[in-house]
Image (cartoon, helix red, strand yellow):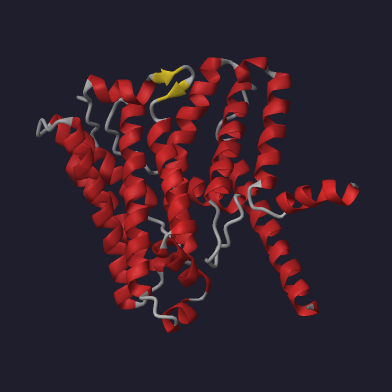
């Protein structure tokens, strides 16, 4: 009976999402016990608003990690899409839906530029995206002259700050759809399997008939799309087209996927575990605010979490390799 009971638990314990889920539950219980206001409807709404945007940022990096690369320009793409969205509404007077679609296309185009240069030149994604980070940020500042766009339509502001069912904000809906879509793509679609195959072993994937260059471009295009969507939602949440949007995304974009068990060398990511990683970061951030602790410590905590998660993943890889040797 003991073995039967432990069987499912042992299987769950080996999944990527089990550890982050356990940490999430413990964090909620501990923080809620010390400060009951943490579980108030208002605070839950604030948490969900942060999670909705931050999950898209994390997914944007996760899809690049899956292919065995990194995208340092995630924040620059999101910021460029955000000020394009706000600027097209204020300067050109475009309706919000049209401006949103065009901003998303800008994100896709920016991501494709990264992917095409990486696939065409063979230069490291680190170098290419570092260069494009500077380029996209320069375009951002050139368009705005470092000045915000203030004239955001009321409907956009309402979408970014109101609930469809208390305490669930509207921003949860696009993020939930993206999460489901990413999970289906990575687990059920040929493109998703190709992304993971390229990340696992690009040479073997090419020998099996997969176009590595095409997959890399697709992964970066998806990353750009998700970064752009995060930027658009953040305009609604902040109620302003701020040129600094995206400047602080880089650490978060890596932290959540790594906490979720993503292998930085590629080939293995988890949508659900990455989402839980975002939740953990949001809980820690909110706890620091509730306990009046210096919010700048968030960066210190995130750095520590990344080191811890990378260490845990490395130990898991070593354990798996030793098991394979014994077999």
Corner quadrant of residue 316 = bottom right
Residue 317: x and y, percent?
69, 66
**How many numbered marks, from 0 up?**
0
Residue 169: x and y, percent?
42, 24
Residue 20: x and y, percent?
65, 44
Residue 142 placement, left or right of 107: left
The foreground one among 39 and 129 is 39
Residue 68 placement, left or right of 160: right
Corner quadrant of residue 171 = top left
Q: Farthest residue in the right direction?
A: 2
Q: Is residue 292 above or below residue 270?
A: above
Residue 34 placement, left or right of 237: right
The foreground one among 137 and 312 is 312
Please name the residue shown 74% across and 75% down the image. 324
Residue 180: x and y, percent?
45, 44
Please name the residue shown 66% across and 36% down the image. 24
Please name the residue shown 45% across and 28% down the image. 49
The foreground one among 110 and 181 is 181
Which quarter of the rendering shows the C terminus?
Answer: bottom right
């Amino acid at each position: 009976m003991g073995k039967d009971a432990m069987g499912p638990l042992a299987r769950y314990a080996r999944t990527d999402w089990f550890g982050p889920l356990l940490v999430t539950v413990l964090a909620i219980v501990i923080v809620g016990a010390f400060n009951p206001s943490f579980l108030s409807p208002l605070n839950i709404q604030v948490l969900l608003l942060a999670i909705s945007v931050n999950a898209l940022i994390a997914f944007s990096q996760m899809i690049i990690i899956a292919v065995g690369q990194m995208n340092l320009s995630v924040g620059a793409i999101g910021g460029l899409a955000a000020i394009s969205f706000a600027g097209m509404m204020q300067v050109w007077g475009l309706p919000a839906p049209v401006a949103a679609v065009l901003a998303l296309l800008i994100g896709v185009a920016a991501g494709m530029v990264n992917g095409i240069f990486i696939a065409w030149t063979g230069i490291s994604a680190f170098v290419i995206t570092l260069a494009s980070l500077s380029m996209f940020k320069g375009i951002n500042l050139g368009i705005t002259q470092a000045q915000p766009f203030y004239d955001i339509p009321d409907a956009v502001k309402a979408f970014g700050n109101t609930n469809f069912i208390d305490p669930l904000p509207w921003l949860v809906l696009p993020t939930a759809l993206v999460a489901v879509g990413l999970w289906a793509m990575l687990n059920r679609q040929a493109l998703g399997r190709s992304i993971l195959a390229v990340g696992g072993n690009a040479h073997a994937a090419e020998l099996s008939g997969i176009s590595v260059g095409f997959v890399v471009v697709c992964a970066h295009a998806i990353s750009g799309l998700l970064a752009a969507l995060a930027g658009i939602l953040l305009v609604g949440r902040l109620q302003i087209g701020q040129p600094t949007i995206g400047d602080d995304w880089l650490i978060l974009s890596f932290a959540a996927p790594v906490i979720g068990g993503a292998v930085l060398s590629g080939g293995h990511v988890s949508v659900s575990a990455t989402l839980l990683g975002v939740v953990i970061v949001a809980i820690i951030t909110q706890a620091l605010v509730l306990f009046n602790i210096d919010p700048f410590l968030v960066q210190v905590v995130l750095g520590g979490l990344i080191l811890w998660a990378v260490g845990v993943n490395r130990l898991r890889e070593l354990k798996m390799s030793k098991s394979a040797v014994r077999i």
